[in-house]
Each structure stands twice: as C-alpha cells, then as structure tokens.
C-alpha cells in the first residue's frame, strides 16, 4: 500500500486483472496484474452526443512468492492510461529473465517523481510515442529508463502485443499510424 498511496492505509486494490508470471531459477514466482476497468461517458464530437466506453489501464502490481509459497514482497508501479479505441497501444508487456521482471510501457516524456521511492508514468502513446522499460529486480528494487524516444520513432508503439522470442530474449514491437509502419526490436540482457 505504501507503493500505491505513499502511506500505509487500510484499503483494497480493486479491478485487478492477472497479466503474467515468471518462474525464477530458484523456483520463486513473480506475477503481475493490472488495475483495469471500463467507464461509460459521452462524446460530443460532430454536434451529436454519443455514448462511448473508456478503457482504463492503471497501476501494475507485481508480487514475488518464494518456492514455499510465502509472499516475499509486492510492488506497485503507478501509471494511468485510458483509451476509447485500440488497446494495443495501452497497458504493458511483462518479460521475466533470471531473477528480474521487465515491464515495457508507453508513457509521456518523463515519469513524475512522487516521492523518494514512488514514480508515476502518465499516458503518452498518442502524442509522444516514448517507450520505457521498468526493471524490478529479485529484491523488489525498481529502476527504469527510456528505450525509445519520440524523436527516433514517430509512430505509436503497440506495447501490449509484441512478438516474444524467449529462446533469444528478443521482443519485437509493431509501431503504426495510418499506413506508416515500423518494427522495434528489443533484446533483454
């Protein structure tokens, strides 16, 4: 709860959708889930009002269970994304390697620093197609870096649906806007 709210609170995390898991060489389990929910609203675009659904892809929760099944730690990666259209550009992809878990997300220019240990990634896939990788190591420590800058790739990256080649630790992301297309290759080392 400290990761999520910045303080200890007696609250529940709701709307979690299980997304991925990774078994480490020590048979520990890293699993992630995402806060996901749908809201209904109205769009007043062409002079007419129509009902629209908005799909929210918010915080990522990552937990580590040891080989005996006891929880060693849980982390919350603060993010806020909403889309009315193709969800391929929202959400995230998780990839486990060794003791570590990597999360690939689209975000705005830079994450907002909330406190010493907490950061917030804001939506950015439509205007700024920046792709970040967040690494959570075996101890639960979090680090991040920008992998793709909007000056290098001017197309939004379909970050939630890559091709993953686990044998070579390669991920291949598709970027597209209209008829323009590009592939982005990432190697996890």
Image (spheres, rainbow, N blue to C red):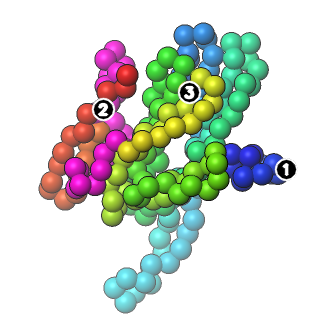
Could you tell me which secondary element the residue under label 3 belongs to?
Answer: loop
| Occupied quadrant, residue 92 | top left
| First to last magenta residue range | 147-172
Which residue is rendered at x = 43% and y = 83% of the image? Answer: 44
Where's residue 93, x and y in %?
A: 44, 38
Front disc: 1 or 3: 3
Q: Give the numbered dot on residue 182.
A: none
Q: Give the numbered dot on residue 137.
A: 3
What whole-number distance in Å separates the C-alpha atoms at marks 1 and 3? 27 Å
Query: Is 151 within the magenta?
Result: yes
Tell me if label 2 and label 3 are in contact, CB under 8 Å: no
Which residue is rendered at x = 56% and y = 27% of the image? Answer: 137
Query: Can you identify the residue that label 2 sits on?
Result: 186
Which residue is rendered at x = 54% and y = 19% of the image? Answer: 99
Above/below status of 142 relative to 4: above
Could you tell me which secondary element the residue under label 2 belongs to?
Answer: strand
State which tag comes first along the sequence, 1 or 3: 1
Q: Residue furthest left?
A: 179
Report whether residue 109 is seen.
Answer: yes
State which tag comes first along the sequence, 2 or 3: 3
Q: Give the numbered dot on residue 10.
A: 1
Figure quadrant of the C terminus: top left
Q: Residue furthest top?
A: 26
Q: Describe residue 11's horizontal placement relative to residue 32 as left or right.
A: right
Which one is in front, 14 or 123? 123
Q: Residue furthest front?
A: 116
């Amino acid at each position: 709860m400290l990761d999520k709210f910045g303080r200890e609170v007696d609250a529940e995390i709701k709307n979690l959708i299980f997304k991925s898991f990774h078994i480490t060489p020590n048979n520990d389990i890293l699993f992630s889930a995402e806060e996901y929910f749908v809201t209904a609203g109205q769009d007043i675009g062409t002079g007419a009002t129509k009902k629209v659904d908005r799909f929210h892809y918010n915080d990522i929760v990552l937990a580590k269970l040891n080989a005996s099944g006891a929880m060693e730690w849980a982390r919350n990666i603060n993010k806020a994304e909403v889309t009315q259209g193709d969800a391929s550009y929202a959400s995230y992809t998780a990839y486990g390697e060794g003791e570590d878990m990597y999360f690939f997300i689209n975000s705005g220019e830079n994450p907002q620093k909330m406190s010493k240990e907490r950061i917030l990634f804001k939506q950015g896939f439509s205007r700024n197609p920046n792709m970040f990788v967040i690494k959570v190591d075996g101890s639960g420590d979090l680090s991040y870096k920008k992998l793709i800058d909007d000056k290098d790739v001017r197309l939004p990256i379909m970050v939630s649906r890559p091709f993953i080649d686990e044998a070579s630790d390669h991920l291949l992301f598709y970027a597209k806007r209209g008829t323009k297309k590009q592939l982005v290759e990432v190697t996890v080392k």
